[in-house]
Amino acid sequence: MYNGIINKRILNSYISVDCVIFGYNGQELQVLLVDRTLTNKETGEPEFTDLTLTGNHIYEDETIDDAAYRVLFDLTGLKNVFLDQFKTFAHPDRLKKENDRKWLLHDGRDPNKRIVSIGFFSLIATQSITLEWKGRNVKWVSISEVGELAFDHNEILNEALIALRNKIKHEPIGFELLPERFSLTQMQNVYEVILGTELDKRNFRKKIARMKYLIPTDEKQTGVPHKPARLYVFSREVYEKTKKELFDFTV
Amino acid sequence: MYNGIINKRILNSYISVDCVIFGYNGQELQVLLVDRTLTNKETGEPEFTDLTLTGNHIYEDETIDDAAYRVLFDLTGLKNVFLDQFKTFAHPDRLKKENDRKWLLHDGRDPNKRIVSIGFFSLIATQSITLEWKGRNVKWVSISEVGELAFDHNEILNEALIALRNKIKHEPIGFELLPERFSLTQMQNVYEVILGTELDKRNFRKKIARMKYLIPTDEKQTGVPHKPARLYVFSREVYEKTKKELFDFTV
DNA sequence: CCATTAAGTGTCTCTTTGACACTAACTATC
DNA sequence: GATAGTTAGTGTCAAAGAGACACTTAATGG
């Protein structure tokens, strides 16, 4: 709602992108977080530690998408990554947590300066990366185990999850979290952890049998102590050909 | 894709909201545009004229949503308006059209300064407003008749349309474009013009008969030269109660 | 070779979709 | 006040999709 405003100075702000990077470890949906530890300049003792999403400022000559791809590339070394701009955050108080103020001061930044952040979410196959980012520690954290994050990053993460859930209901993006070749059980698990539902195996397979862009290969799992699953690949070409505007206005 | 960058100066920018305001005149989907005419300071002659979306800068103490509601309120006088933040635009060249440069110079603004714009779309019942906005001319233009707009506003409008089409497939927002009491035929027309499809009257009614939040009233149309239609109202309470997470991952 | 484990498969019922055509109720005009 | 014009409102059938449900198969490990 329109609540009125206090002063009429026009907001002039740095612009950053924040990327919510989702991964899947075979069991759970995870998110990649940066471990931020502030050491006291005099004593060298760690003063506080917490976790943030990964983000960076946008440069002057750069598009928003380029900035997001750059953040992802710096962090993961990957270039062709699924990325979706889902929402922009600019609440006047979004950097006002005590630790955040300390951190910004430590970085030489003005903790009273508002920063607008454009939120992206990304899906990556966790097998494909090694973690290192500008000397900071990054780690995978299961969605269910994410505690309090810096800034407004809990809000950004929640909105990203909502966007992800909505998107996966209508577009085939689950495979982005899986290796190039994957089994249908893996795919089903991805849907289950994202949507938080249990799905019936046979019904799930009936459903995706209609999706012609999931192509069975001759390959099977190896080294598993049970019947090995057939592996599938996602065909973007087939997908682009077969997708149509679907008319469902459910709800 | 990540194309590299030319300089590494951090983007510092004004932030604006741009609102794509959709309306419905009983026949077509329309959008509210501002007629921008630049008059030569010396001769008083109009130098050029074009159309823009409605937008404004965000103030320092204001949330993004507040700014968007403020823009809408200033333009329409309406306070409880459907509003949806759909995408943020900040391409480095987005203000680089010739007329835009002239316009910015005329306003005393730096035409080389990049401005980040947060895009919203809004649905309003056109009957409910009278048009006046800061002395400028605003007018309804049918979607099919929108020509070239200022800045990157064609792109913003296109993205807004995509967002609107996606949203109306899954959430009951069509009534936002209609008077408080509306007929089912009106509702069907709204879906048809937004989705660009023809719908079967009986099937449409079967479908929305399941939507318990469309409540028939005792009232009927008057003054129409044919059988008068029953009027319905949308019940937000019923909607909030009956909506559930639907599990459809079609496509 | 036996136990364990996950893969893979079919049927039935119920709901939803989509195609299709006539009667009802009001106004305007003659 | 009869008639023409116009849109409202309604039901059925066939095809497709959703959802519930249980057994056999193929690998490994001991």
Image: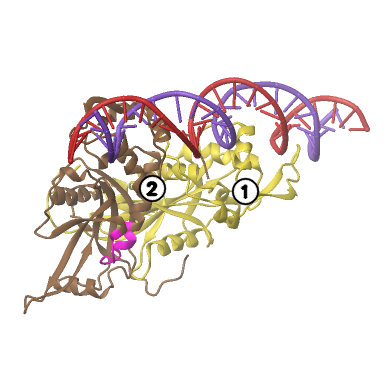
Chain colours: A brown, B yellow, C purple, D red
B98 vs A114, nearest the viewer: A114
Q: Quadrant of residue B237?
A: bottom right
Position of residue A219 in the picture relative to residue A172 (left or right): left
B201 vs C27, nearest the viewer: B201
Residue sitting at 35 percent across and 48 percent down? A194
Is A156 colored magenta in this rendering?
Answer: yes
A248 is higher (above) or lower (below) than D14? below
Chain letter, disc 1 residue: B
On the image, numbered disc 1 is attached to which residue?
Answer: B212
Label 1 and label 2: CA atoms lie apart by: 26 Å
Kind of residue at badge 1:
Lys
Residue sitting at 17 percent across and 49 percent down? A70
Total marks placed: 2
Near mark 1 (Cα within 10 A), the count class, few <14, some 14-19 or many ≥20, is some
B192 vs B43, nearest the viewer: B192
A84 vs D10, nearest the viewer: D10
Q: Position of residue A211 (x, y in %)?
A: 37, 29
Q: Position of residue A39 (x, y in %)?
A: 11, 73
In this view of the protein, can residue B40 be seen by the observer?
A: no
Q: Position of residue A115 (x, y in %)?
A: 26, 64
Magenta extent: A145-157
Chain letter, disc 2 residue: A
State the mark number for residue A195: 2
Position of residue B184 in the picture relative to residue B219 (left or right): left
For the residue labelled by badge 2, is the local secondary structure a helix, a strand or a loop? helix
Kind of residue at badge 2:
Leu
C21 is higher (above) or lower (below) than B209? above
Residue sitting at 58 percent across and 49 percent down? B175
Q: Quadrant of residue A88?
A: bottom left
Residue sitting at 46 percent across and 55 percent down? B83
Is A7 colored magenta in this rendering?
Answer: no
